[in-house]
Image (cartoon, rainbow, N blue to C red):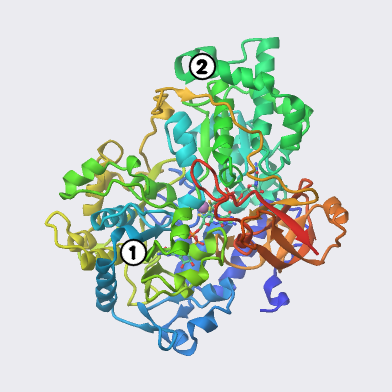
Amino acid sequence: MSHDERTQDEDTPFYDQPTGGWGSVKGMLRLMKTERPDAGVIETLMRQNKPGEYMCTSCAWAKPPSPHRFEFCENGAKATIWDLTRDRCTPELFATHTVEELKGWSDHELEMAGRLTHPLRYDAASDRYVPCSWEEAFAGIGAELKALDPKSVVFYASGRASLETSYLWALFARLYGHNNLPDSSNMCHETTSVGLKKVIGSPVGTCVLEDFDHCDLILFFGQNTGTNSPRFLHPLQEAVRRGCRIVTFNPVRERGLIEFADPQNPLQMLTNTGTDLSEIYLQVKPGGDIAALAGLCKRVLELEESIGAVLDRAFIDEHTNGFEEFAEAMRDTDWEAIERESGLARADLEEVGSLCVKASRTIGIYGMGLTQQVHGSQSIAMLVNLLLLRGNIGREGTGISPVRGHSNVQGQRTVGISEKPELVPLDKLAEQFGFEPPRETGRTTVEAVQGVLDGSVRGFVSLGGNFARAVPDQGRTDPAWKKLALNVQIATKLNRSHLLVGESTWLLPCLVRAEEDRQASGPQAVTMEDSLSHIHGSVGKREPASEMLRSELAIVAGIAKATLSPNPKVRWDEWTGDYSLVRDLIAETYPEQFHDFDARKFTPGGFYRGNAARERNWQTESGRAELTVPSTLSALGKKPEAGGFTLVTLRSNDQFNTTVYGFSDRLRGLSGDRDIVLMNPDDITRAGLVEGQRITLESTVEDGVERRVANLTVTPYDLPDGCVGAYYPETNALVPLDYHDIASKTPAYKGAPVRVLP
Ligand SMILES: Nc1nc2c(c(=O)[nH]1)N[C@H]1C(S)=C(S)[C@@H](COP(=O)(O)OP(=O)(O)OC[C@H]3O[C@@H](n4cnc5c(=O)[nH]c(N)nc54)[C@H](O)[C@@H]3O)O[C@H]1N2
Ligand SMILES: Nc1nc2c(c(=O)[nH]1)N[C@H]1C(S)=C(S)[C@@H](COP(=O)(O)OP(=O)(O)OC[C@H]3O[C@@H](n4cnc5c(=O)[nH]c(N)nc54)[C@H](O)[C@@H]3O)O[C@H]1N2
Ligand SMILES: [Mo]
């Protein structure tokens, strides 16, 4: 594809317009042109995220009970258009291209081939995927799984599949005999599941949508709302209009956190003006959040000493543990260290610390900027510390709110997809289905990759996603996949992971959520959980992309039935015929949260499954919320060497994870090329480089593996000194597999030490 075609109608040098606005409309229209979805896509978009209708597959942001007329955003529309494309990736494509040839295609080109239409079996002799029947696929996969040791098999899930499919997926793994259930969460918010659980007893956030109507301060850490959860801009805009203040900590100046024009507001659209969002924007160094938060806590504690009545003493006494040690540690941390490690000025941190004291209701928001660091769990714990000082958890208008990624990634963990058996009610499952579930801890994503590398993983079954492309040390495992006895990929579109074929390899095409899912009892609804723990039903109405497609649930059930010996309590066919029976099973396993599940599935705004920490019931070891002393002020695992840099890997406004919709990064004013490296102009000069020069980045982690990405164009951008930015997944080869959050093994994709080779 030529550079000109890539930029197309997107003319975006130095974008200084508000987020949303006309640019977002243009972005959608461009994709409409290339994907040419059928006219039904408009109907689908109009139903998007409305009660009882269709829930978008893009992000996990909440769906309000009284939606806007268009309750979708630029990126949600792109996801729907991408799913409902007219293009088809048929057996003919595979008849004319070997797998080796397809490896030469870009990620964008592979997905642009369109929706997969037929179940496919890999034929090693011709190096081609060939069509097969579903019966052949299920029987073939079942035979392989039966022959393998269950402990050597991994079931990976990307966070889109419904609660119904996810529940059966986890049940299948346990009936088969393992807890190797990593999901995309292991690369994403696992730091939250582990880190937040430890300090407040909840693996998920404590806020609900109404809290955004009552807060008067929002602290934003490392979450890029304009690109990754744009519908969240509406409540933020409304909060600002009411007088709520927003302070952002992010190394990159992200347009989406600075100003927003509501595409549904005619005045803002006509005048091309927006609402200012962040009042203060602090460009913290990558990994500098622990220090920045220490500065805020220190300021709050200093004000307590000077003016008094700053801390919520009653709350601290009744609900927390460790206050004295924490306060002393903050007093002992000097400002010089805080400034050095955060890259921020004391005066700025003091100002924000004072805002924290003025505010009576504060919410802390965070995303990948905190979770994807070696000491990410400690950054989260520090944000909790700050909130606890003034009783900002468990009160209306306050709380901690991790913004989750995939549209059901939080829900997948809720209904049992977890490699950590202690998080799953195994005794309950044993009783419900009459079997002895495996009790050993399963593999995380990082451990799954290690297993592929060292040969201890023999079988890999993937419920969506693009595992090989999303993981760290990308490419390093490629040769190892050939040795797998079994590789099964359940997918909607072709991607690179599908080309890493093992001995027995199957590519199984499934319905997307917008398509009608018709089973024995009629059309089915599915459900998912949003970032704020509300559960929503979704109904697809579009004609499936091919007659041969099956639902994810039917595919999981088909494989399970062909693998397991019969059990009268396990009724794959009946469950496939009527998903409400699966909802009943979920309600039986988790009665407190999911009682009357089927009847409540279309509750406007979703039904809330509750959160103990929100009620100030702390399910921690001590039974209280924990104030913890960080062991370090930098969340980085390894500081850059002299003259070196910390690499943060970024998402553009024109991708969904490894799915590259196009080559525009409108909100950053960039377009046409993804092989770029963002550097600040002073760093460019200091390194003796010039804009437009092609350079190589090399990892400075020395463990015997050479990690380099070449041919990146030097591009000036507003970043702190010593920090470079580049796109994910193109630069994943620079992130070492063993470089991850210590507590949760979430890869440190936002803090990789690198050097520049001209
Ligand atoms: N359109 C679209 N929507 C998406 C996705 C997508 O790819 N495209 N992906 C989905 C998924 S799975 C997820 S998990 C979410 C991801 O959504 P986010 O959590 O927003 O993740 P990122 O865009 O990777 O990075 C967030 C921000 O962290 C900042 N950052 C980097 N390092 C640091 C640091 O050390 N400290 C601080 N304070 N900030 C830092 C970066 O500059 C960036 O602005 O979005 C979901 N929604
Ligand atoms: N360097 C770097 N690496 C990262 C990150 C980062 O910020 N930086 N972020 C990490 C994060 S937060 C995440 S969540 C992971 C993402 O990792 P994954 O979830 O594994 O990857 P995706 O790109 O979301 O998966 C895209 C593929 O999913 C399939 N698909 C799409 N829709 C469906 C569906 O409805 N059903 C099925 N069965 N398949 C479907 C399509 O075939 C598509 O090609 O990447 C991680 N990797
Ligand atoms: Mo994610």
Kindly state the secondary structure of the residue where label 1 is placed: helix
Question: Percent from the top left, x then y, of residue 499?
Answer: 48, 75
What amino acid type should be assigned to the residue bearing mark 1?
Glu
Mark 1 or 2, which is nearer the eye? 2
Q: Is residue 251 left or right of residue 242?
A: right
Q: Residue furthest front?
A: 704
Question: Percent from the top left, x then y, of residue 310?
Answer: 62, 15
What amino acid type should be assigned to the residue bearing mark 2?
Ile
State the CA–CA distance, disc 1 to disc 2: 47 Å
The image quadrant where one finds the N terminus is bottom right
- Neighbour tally class for label 2: few under 14, some 14-19, many 20 plus, Cα within 10 Å: some
Question: Percent from the top left, x then y, of residue 202?
Answer: 42, 34
Choose between 570 and 584: the one closer to the eye: 570
Kindly state the secondary structure of the residue where label 2 is placed: helix
One can see residue 183 in this view = yes
Cβ at disc 1 under 8 Å from ligand 2: yes
Residue 159's label in the rendered image is none
Question: Percent from the top left, x then y, of residue 552?
Answer: 33, 64
**Residue at screen point 29% across, 60% down:** 150
One can see residue 588 in this view = no
Q: Is residue 217 left or right of residue 272?
A: left
Cβ at disc 2 under 8 Å from ligand 1: no
Q: Name the residue that disc number 2 marks.
A: 316
Q: Is residue 311 left or right of residue 93?
A: right
Picture layout, residue 411 above or below residue 485: above
Residue 552's label in the rendered image is 1
